[in-house]
Image: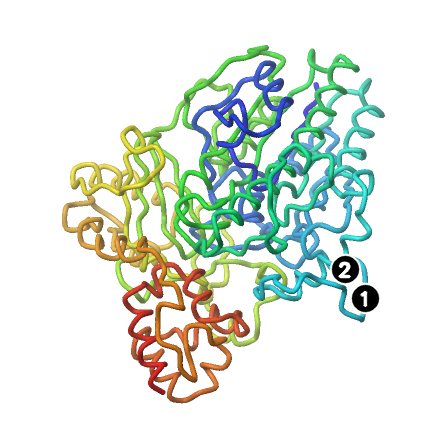
Amino acid sequence: MKAIMVMFDSLNRHMLPPYGGDWTHAPNFARLAGRATTFEHCYAGSMPCMPARREIHTGRYNFLHRGWGPLEPFDDSMPELLKQNGVYTHLVSDHPHYWEDGGATYHGRYNTWEFFRGQEGDPWKGRVADPEMPEDLKRMRHTIYRQDWVNRPYMDTEAKHPQTLTFDAGLEFVRTNAAQDRWFVQIETFDPHEPFFTHKQYKDLYPHDYDGPHFDWPDYKRVTETPRQVDHARYEYAALLSMCDHSLGRVLDTMDDLGLWEDTLLIVCTDHGLLLGEKGWWGKSVQPWYNELVHLPLFVWDPRAAAAGERREALVQTIDLAPTLLEYFGLDRPADMQGIPLNSGATRQAGLFGIHGGHVNVTDGRYVYMRAPASAANEPLHEHTLMPTHMRGRFSPAELAGIELAEPFAFTKGVRTIRVAGRTFVNAYHFGTLLYDLETDPEQRAPVVDDAAELRMAGLLVELMRANDAPPGQFERLGLPVTGAVTEEHLLVRAQLDRAERSAAPLPRPEDYPEGRLSLRTPVKALIADPVAVEVLRRHVPGIVDSELLQMLGATPLIDVAAMAGGLLPPPRLRAIAEELAEL
């Protein structure tokens, strides 16, 4: 028995032909759907990249206890369990986050691994002088943008693209070991994650007139670009999606050529999607986790069932992948794993999803309930970990100054974790608590106020949080009971409806406001340097001057910060700020 998992990053379900995408060129995804089982209701769990991968290893939710980070010493790792039980495991990836501080424990769980450089801002090629870059590139994450433009000349053909090299190596492993038994290979590409860097033959699949600025890497923010820019970015994403489809086709061809369909499990999956202007947003992480981000594509071929062309309605999640692979190779899943093998016939009533410090969300397949913090403080919020690292760095001494030891959780095998103050760039409180009925509003355009439905969904949310041994602080942060029943006094949709409406209002155009010495166009670092402007900001948005978001975006105009911050800087507040700044 053998298994192949092909994993993409930021793969949009709604743009794939098997899920109704009718304008993208992706014939191999359609071919796959005809050969495998297509899951209609697959949802993410913990977001974004590395939290999702922790779930793929451990088969349990990550986001209630900590944010982005490595595997923990007490974690059960699916590839490691396979390795320990005689299944050879191999990882092939171009995903740069595996080799940063916040992901450095994942690849070592496999017998062997390969990594191909150059994606996103991977610190790969060294160049002291600045590369030639388009003048209009965004200011956010400037260092990463700069590195990306250093890297691109080294990937100037499809053969040198890290996605191609990843699939080359993965298929080499498959061909080399096709006659052997009991192996698992994970072929994982960072694409179609931004930046949408690909080559002419894929761009030519989407001809369109465009003479605007270079734009293949949208920031995580509200859409402030022109409709033509939005369309262009979607075509750039689609071109990279088509390259991913070509790579998928190589896997399917290899399975055909080697006769692997008879004894090889194939899983094709992703961690999350990406907003490309839908609902007026780019990217992920900043806004609520809408279905474009969490309702995922999933295709599975299990040679034991041989259910080609089947479409399955069961509600499944990312946490189900680890137990599925363990069960396939005849291994028992550890007690800590909450996922359900995909072929078990068991069903779940509801599933959790979210990001640490953001909304805590639950869906039953029809309703999606997004629970915001009960107060603007978004507290208490703690990280529980024994591996104190963020995405690209370690916890600072300041973050560790208030360190405490927490009591063991049910899944930490008797081990106490450290507990430190958590952090989040954007406070979900400003978006309010949201409830969507996907039956009547599949695009989540209009949140509903329905006390009975909210009461039921809040009950499911609390039930799943308790089953996950969520920290007591999470219940307090969300205004939910640690013990006992959820009652009408705990409901928040109606109470926070004004926040949802304000956060959804269109952003103003800066030219519609008076210009003075300081304005909405002024970079925030200049505003922070002006004592009077600081007082204006503090009066209208308490805490924003000292926020990590503002410090990170020092060269960004205030209007662009508003685009990133969602409900934190709603249009009425921006108007008042603009008018006061113009008078200074």
Q: Are marks 2 and 1 in contact (CB under 8 Å)?
A: yes
Measured as percent of width and height from the top left, residue 378 is found at 34, 63
* Quadrant in which residue 249 is drawn: top right
Colour mapping used in the image: rainbow
Above/below status of 47 relative to 557:
above
Which quadrant: the N terminus?
top right
Above/below status of 375 relative to 536:
above
Kind of residue indicated by mark 2: Val
- Res. 195 in view: yes
- Classify 10 Å Cα crowding around label 2: few (below 14), some (14-19), many (20 and above): many
Q: Which mark is residue 150?
A: 2
* Quadrant in which residue 27 is drawn: top right
- Res. 413 in view: no
Query: Is 574 displayed left or right of 220 in the figure?
Result: left
Per the model, the C-alpha gap separating discs 2 and 1 is 7 Å
Kind of residue indicated by mark 1: Arg
Q: Which residue is tagged 1? A: 127
